[in-house]
Image (spheres, rainbow, N blue to C red):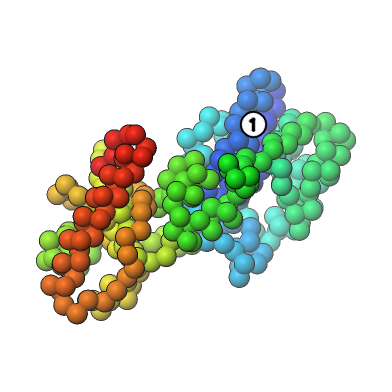
Amino acid sequence: MSGLPPAPNGTVVTVGSFDGVHRGHRAVIDAVVRRARSTGRTSVAVTFEPHPLAVLRPEQAPSRLTTATERIAAIAETELDYLVVLEFDRALAALEPEAFVRQVLIDRCRMKHLVVGHDHGFGRGRSGDLAMLQALGRSDGFGVEVVPPITETDGQVVSSSAIRSAVERGDFAAAARGLGRPYRVSGRVEQGEQRGRTLGVPTVNVAPPPGKLLPPDGVYAVRVEWGGGVAGGMMNQGSRPTVGDRHRWLEAHLFDFDGNLYGREIRIEWVAPLRGIRRFESLTALRDQLERDRVAAQAALEGVRTSNGVSAP
């Protein structure tokens, strides 16, 4: 907390896990920024790492829509002034909501106004509900603002759990609607065994980040970005049974690219599912299938480009 600069007029704060930094989270953050600007205050978001459930009930902890790095990067794209990341441990979890508000938000963050989502709860057992916050606001001198839910056209509330469900069933369009951007994963390209080159499909290989939610294993049309470049491609997510490799990899072949990305950070966007993982009787059969995958992936990428009305690899 000592990294926060002086805020003579105090701060406008929001608190949450913000997994996914989806459209609902963005609405809350945007409300924080608007309130801060209109009152001459500093805008602050307070979040936790790891996810609280990973500490309190690990068996119930969800896979993450965004890793810690991805979440921070997504919040950095907003107009928020500061992000405070608290280490979530048993001691923090044991704080009563009144103590959390007074010790963390008021004393350390200099909060004068609190903005929360419609379903907000924090403190021990999530007992810090809206009624309690409003009562604290009256007694301790801070304002409380509640941001209504963001809903889809069918009335479903945008939420991390709904987006997780979409990713788990491979519905990337639904996930993108909730997130406000495509579903992606970031990672560093590692040296593989270069089997793809022998098949005419050199690949970039990324190990799935621990805890990151992945769609079902299979072959996908993807879009890959790195510093200074972008390419469409096809990706095998999962094991490689034809060559006896049981390790789970993200292994993408990039179209119209012949460079070297070893050691580089890349971002992979799932575009469309092509087929499931299967074992082929020979490398020739695998090579033939990969050519069919290439055609299908290029068609899927072109379909996304056409439907969006924007240029894509």
Q: Can residue 96 be seen by looking at this rendering? A: yes
Residue 86 location in percent, x, y?
A: 61, 49
- Name which residue type carries label 1: Val
Q: Residue 19: horizontal and vertical position, in percent?
A: 56, 50
How far across and how far down the image is residue 83, in percent?
Answer: 57, 39
Res. 3 visible in picture? no
Q: Position of residue 215 (x, y in %)?
A: 43, 61
> Is residue 103 shown left or right of residue 190?
right
**In the foreground, 259 or 269:** 269
Residue under the image location 15 percent in, 67 percent down: 287
253 sits to left or right of 107: left
* Image: 90 above or below 181: below
Query: Could you tell me which secondary element the residue under label 1 belongs to?
Result: helix
With respect to residue 36, does 114 lie above or below?
below
Residue at the spot of label 1 = 32
Q: In the rendered view, does 224 fall on the left or right side of 56? A: left
